[in-house]
Structure formats: C-alpha cells, structure tokens
Amino acid sequence: MTVRQVLAEKGEGVVTLSPDCSLAEAARLLSDRRIGAVVVSGADGRVDGILSERDIVRAVARDGAGALEARVESWMTREVVTCAREVAIDDLMQTMTQGKFRHVPVVEEGRLVGIVSIGDVVKRRVAAIEAEAQMLKEYIAG
C-alpha cells in the first residue's frame, strides 16, 4: 500500500495556517478541527513548517501563557520531513518511528497535496494484517 492509496481513502484535504498567526489561533484551530498538527504554509502552497500541539505545550512551558501571543513561525518545525504519494506505507511508518514524529505532509512538485498521520498508517497496516490473517484461515480451512 502507498501513500496515494491512503489519501484516496481519507481525502487530500489539509488544514494549513499562516506563519504569522498566533499560537493562540493555532491552538484554537487544532482544538476545533480535533487534529494534532497543522501545516504552516503561505499563499504559494509550499510547506514552510509544521506546528504540533507539542510545540504549543513547549512554548507555554517555557514562556507561560504569554507564549500564546507569539507567532507560529517562532515555534514551528522548519525542517519538515515530507513524502511523495508513491512512498510505501511500511517505509513511511519506519521513517515516522525513527524520526519520532506523527505527521508527514505529502508534497508533489513542491506543492502540498495531503498529510498522513501515524494513525492513518497504523489503521491501514492493521487492516492489511487482518486481511492476510483471514486469507490464511480460509486457505487452511480449505
């Protein structure tokens, strides 16, 4: 299974935020959308960074409630690991595990086209394992 198949199932919509938004705005967006990270992007559709709920917690832990007035660009991860639609899910899962991050933007020709979370990856991997187990049971039962 590839990222293309995951995006076909879940959709290619991505929540984005401007780098000049405040952390308070970002926190509201994450809460309202019930998501764990938001891609930071300008009008050109390129990935400028990614901001996770963990980034916001780190900001508040360091600077107190006043951190919520800071701009997203001050706390976002700038060196974002991305992938293409043709990447195999198993390879992506390994990348995410090794890098200790939970969200990977999908980029084609420099433009954001989707996002995959570790939950998306695990859901598809479990489904594949269950299908394989069912096929083996049917084979054994003859």
Image (tube, rainbow, N blue to C red):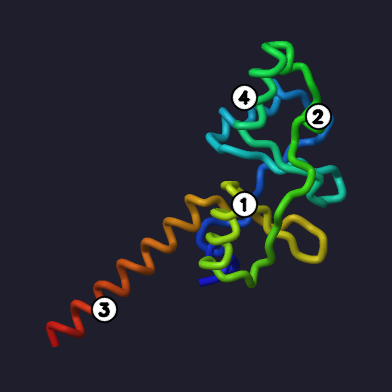
Q: Which residue is mark 4?
A: 57
Task: Give the number of the disc on residue 135.
Answer: 3
Local crowd size for mark 2, using a 10 Å CA cut-off: few (<14), some (14–19), many (≥20): some
Q: Earlier in the sequence, mark 3 or mark 1?
A: 1
**On-image quarter of the C terminus:** bottom left
Q: Is residue 117 left or right of residue 39?
A: left
Q: Secondary structure at mark 3?
A: helix
Local crowd size for mark 1, using a 10 Å CA cut-off: few (<14), some (14–19), many (≥20): few
Report the Cα–Cα distance between label 3 and label 2: 51 Å
Eye-nearest disc, 3 or 1: 1
Eye-nearest disc, 3 or 4: 4
Q: Quadrant of residue 52?
A: top right
Identified at 16% across, 83% down, the residue is 140
Q: Quadrant of residue 70?
A: top right
Q: Which residue is mark 1?
A: 99
Choose between 15 and 126: the one closer to the eye: 126
